[in-house]
Image (cartoon, rainbow, N blue to C red):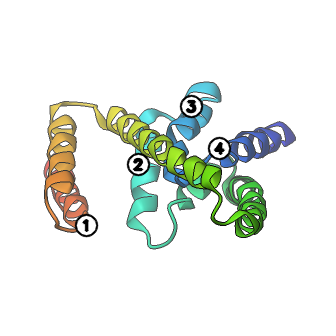
Amino acid sequence: MTAAVFWQLVLGFGAISLVSVGGGIAVLPEMHRLVVEVHGWMSDADFAQRFALAQAAPGPNVLVVGLFGWHVGGVAGMLTATLAMTLPTSFLAFAFSRLRTRLAGRFWLRVVERGLVPIAVGLIGASGLILAQGTATGWVPVVLTACSTVFVWRTDFSPLWVLGAGALVGLAFL
């Protein structure tokens, strides 16, 4: 991994981490823009596959950043991207939690917190659209994505059923 790529990972994921209201998934469209559109480090399909792999693994959603970094620069890229995504936002969250403790009960703080909810929902919705576009490589993935969306939205079953069905459909159409 070259120094230029190292700094692109640090600056790109560091900046993204500071606006990750709603968690790492909320800024997935910006990650997509960074690694697919701006730098061309991977294709839409590669992006969607790495996201699916990170979601199948136990642990936090931010694991996907490590997979993007690994794709770009191996182990050094994985560590760089992960630290760039987690350190700035961790410091910001720590500082905000201390400030929030001192400002607890203030009306304007409740207004700000409630105002961040629709922003997070919108960012997460945009993430879903980006992932759906990355998988739209034929009629089978489009139908599977639509059915998966309706299944998760309208039932109380675990989303793991969707992953299993997707794996079986993938095996059937290989």
Mark closest to the chain's N terminus, 2 or 1: 2
Q: Quadrant of residue 53?
A: bottom left
Q: Amino acid at mark 2?
A: Gln
Q: Write down the residue under mark 1.
A: 160
Mark closest to the chain's N terminus, 4 or 3: 4
Determine the residue positioned at 28% across, 32% down: 136
Q: Write down the residue under mark 2.
A: 49
Q: Quadrant of residue 7?
A: top right
Mark closest to the chain's N terminus, 2 or 3: 3
Mark closest to the chain's N terminus, 1 or 3: 3
**Picture coordinates of residue 146, whole percent (x, y):** 18, 40
**Picture coordinates of residue 28, whole percent (x, y):** 51, 43
Question: Does residue 45 sit above or below 18 in this rendering?
Answer: above
Element type at marker 4?
loop
Q: Residue furthest top?
A: 38
Q: Write down the residue under mark 3.
A: 33
The local crowd at label 2, few if under 14, some if 14 to 19, many if 20 or more residues have their Cα within 10 Å, is: some
Element type at marker 3?
helix
The local crowd at label 3, few if under 14, some if 14 to 19, many if 20 or more residues have their Cα within 10 Å, is: some
Eye-nearest disc, 1 or 4: 4
Q: Amino acid at mark 1?
A: Leu
- Residue 19 disc label: 4
Label 1 to label 4, Cα distance in Å? 29 Å
